Image: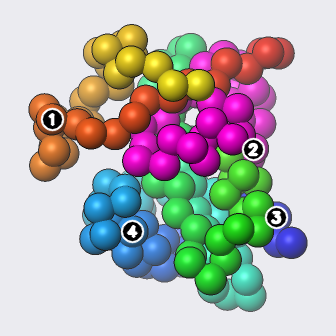
Amino acid sequence: MNPAERAKIRDAPQMHRLINHFADKGEMLARSLSEIYENIRDYFVVRQGERVVACVALHVSWSDLAEIKSLAVAKDSQEQGIGARLVEACLKEARELGIPTVFCLTYKSAFFEKVGFSQIDKAELPHKVWGECYRCPKFPNCDEVALTYHLEEV
């Protein structure tokens, strides 16, 4: 199994295609290539050779809160634990940064619950996290599920 690694600039076009493949199916939110480049330091990837088969971002929202975003695993690489490894890489980094709570907004709540997240009401999230939502075509009728993970040792 290939490890989760920090994304490199050269990975951005493949990450863009992977994320937007699922976004086109309504399974996640789209990301522009420029947004991926601007936030490349937030991303982890899993590669098979030169091919990016999965990606995820950990975006710091505030001193006590970070968000897992854009988790995508290529169809032919699913059911191998890659998504869970990427989430664990994000949680490890949050722990190292001293961030006690990680959240996500997703259409795949069962996956996140399986890796230890708990559902919450979106209204429980601080207003600070909604900055990106104003640009979403689904705003204000968001149909994603909010989940959080509380790190024990920070």
Q: Are marks 3 and 4 in contact (CB under 8 Å)?
A: no
Looking at this view, is 100 or 104 the one in front? 104
Q: Residue at x 74, y 88 (%)?
A: 49
Neighbour tally class for label 3: few under 14, some 14-19, many 20 plus, Cα within 10 Å: some
- First in sequence, mark 3 or 4: give its number: 3
Residue corresponding to mark 2: 88
Q: Is residue 136 visible?
A: yes
Residue 3, numbered circle: 3
Which residue is at the far right? 1
Mark found first going from the N terminus, 1 or 3: 3
Mark 2 or 4 closer to N-term? 4
The one of 58 and 80 positioned closer to us in this rendering: 80
Q: CA distance from mark 3 to mark 2?
A: 11 Å
Label 1 – label 3 distance at C-alpha: 37 Å
List the residue tagged with mark 1.
141
Task: Report the Cα–Cα distance between label 1 and label 2.
Answer: 30 Å
**Which residue type carries mark 2?**
Glu
Q: Is residue 68 magenta?
A: no
Please tell me which residue is depicted at 73% across the width and 20% down the height of the picture.
Answer: 151
| Residue occupied by mark 4 | 22
Q: Mark 1 and 3 residues: CB-CB less than 8 Å, in contact?
A: no
The reply to whether dot 2 and dot 4 touch (C-beta < 8 Å) is: no
Q: Separation of disc 1 and disc 4 at Cα?
A: 20 Å
